[in-house]
Image: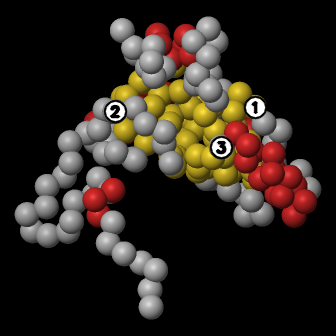
Amino acid sequence: MSDLFNAFEISPVPVPGPDAVAPEPFRGIYGMPMFVTVPTPDLVGSMEFWTRGLGFFELFSIPSHVMHLRRWAFQDVLLVPQTAEAASDAAVTQVNFACLLSELSSIADACNALRSGSSSAPFDTPWNTRDIEVVTPEGARVVFTAAKPMDPDSFEVKNLAKVGIVAPGQEG
């Protein structure tokens, strides 16, 4: 017996076939279950490559911090400025997974128990999340990112409103 079942209705990917049509670019705001972060020394040049070459579009940007690109629903890429540390790495793989605020400490503690110093302390972002970064034994950076409650008076929420993203119940 298998626990697997057909769940194509929750995916933006069309059912394979000769008449399959790609979905339209998705411009809605949602909690991202997973995304890729790409450090780059040239945000504008990278955005041009991702948009003109790979078919992504700029969903929004927070100048000097992040360019959020998307193609279909759940195909999110965050272009971020490359740090000096990342520039010295031959190859940096970073993947981000959504989690809850209440999970951050236990994830960090479990990783640090297995490999001392493998997890960062929680840190806040300009886009209203609290994150931890874990470096795996093979050197991949795995970021667990948790949305913080929307405080309409916070810097982060005001920052998001400036680029057109408003808290639920704060529209118009």
Callout 3 touching callout 1 (CB < 8 Å): no
Q: Amino acid at mark 3?
A: Leu
x 14%, y 55%: residue: 21
Judging by the rendered image, the residue that carries numbered circle 2 is: 28
* Vertical side of 100 occupied by 60: above or below: above
* Camera-nearest label, 2 or 1: 2
145, 133: nearer the viewer: 145
* Vertical side of 143 occupied by 27: above or below: above
Q: Position of residue 27 (x, y in %)?
A: 31, 32
Mark 2 or mark 1, earlier in chain: 2
Q: Amino acid at mark 2?
A: Gly
Quadrant of the drawing holding the N terminus: bottom left
The secondary structure type at the circle numbered 3 is loop
How dense is the environment of label 1, judged by Cα within 10 Å: few (below 14), some, or many (20 and up)?
few
Judging by the rendered image, the residue that carries numbered circle 1 is: 123
Q: Position of residue 76 (x, y in %)?
A: 43, 42
Mark yes or no: residue 163 visible: no
Mark 3 or mark 1, earlier in chain: 3
Q: Residue furthest front?
A: 169
Q: Position of residue 142 (x, y in %)?
A: 67, 51
